Image (spheres, grey):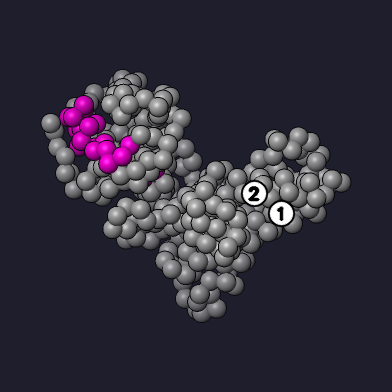
Amino acid sequence: MYQIGIDLGGTFIKAGVVDEQNKIVSKKMVESHVDADVEGLCTRMVQCAVDALTEAGVTMDEVGSIGVGVPGAVDAGRGVVVYCSNIGFRNTPLAGIISQKTGKPVYVQNDANVAAYGEVVAGAAKGYKDVIVVTLGTGVGGGIIIDGKIYSGFNSFGGELGHTVIVHDGEPCPCGRRGCLESYASATALIKQTRISMRNHTESRLWNICPDISKIDGKTAFDAMRAGSKAATEVVNQYINYLGCGLTNFINIFQPEILLIGGGISKEGETLLEPLRKILSVETYGSSMDAPKTKIGVCTLRNDAGTIGAANLHNLYESFITKG
Ligand SMILES: [Zn+2]
């Protein structure tokens, strides 16, 4: 039996056919056209899944279920997308709509939760039951897995780890608060911190790494640090300190077996992890006690985490929608 995992993004829909060993046997991608109506968007999602099936030489009869990751608040128990900021879903019964089009049980979850679950079933957190995943991209995303299940609170809005405050009355955040972790530890924040440093240090080697200030990315400060830039080293150290503060909070609340970092910045690997472990080994509650400690690592499935996680959602929820 195969499962289909669909990753709905603001720009692209990605659909993959996943086998029983959690290997993606085929995948397809089409543009989302989020400005289209809900019906049109759902039709495109199904078509993308059908195209992936055709490529794999698998028929719909061999598919057990379809899972969908959506960038918004999802009531997974009812298969309803409650709210989506950049897609026109408002209390949309997405699982029901796609189930009607395919005749399959359909499961829906928030995309960050789905990606975290992907790491648990087939990635860097495989074998662990209590897991936190923090994704450092345009924003700071979060996924909380407790006892092998996705935790998102009674109303599905939970798990927003990026919108916890680390600096009271600090930098403004798109969510409306000030001082959120997202405003200090996202790639967007790192780019801003790098830009400020370049303006303040016109002699810095940062300018050799990136002569065009509009082209700074999440790697610029790390690359300049490796090239020996003092200013870049300060930017990276400060960035890691902010991140360490947020991660310490999460460990103090959840004490997960493993905490994974994903997203573009996680590609820095040990350059990021080593100083983080140092901070956490001092800051986290119980760090001086002779007790098991949270492991820190990076996500390994990259772009496939959403597809594999979605394809496995059927493990977590009752089949509330069946054929027809
Ligand atoms: Zn926020």
Task: Name the residue: 57% across, 72% down.
Answer: 283
Q: Say what amino acid the circle numbered 1 marks.
A: Val
Q: Say what amino acid the circle numbered 2 marks.
A: Leu
Tell me if residue 271 can be seen.
yes
Q: Quadrant of the N terminus?
A: top left
Figure check: 59 above or below 92: above
Few, some or many C-alpha atoms within 10 Å of disc 2 (few <14, some 14-19, many ≥20)? many
In the displayed structure, does residue 143 sit left or right of residue 171?
A: left
Q: Quadrant of residue 32?
A: top left
Counting from the top left corner in percent of width and height, residue 167 is at 58, 63
Q: Quadrant of residue 43?
A: top left
The span picked out in magenta is: 89-111
Figure check: 245 above or below 156: below
Counting from the top left corner in percent of width and height, residue 52 is at 34, 24
Figure check: 234 above or below 203: below
Task: Name the residue: 80% across, 50% down.
Answer: 200
Labelled disc at residue 190? 2
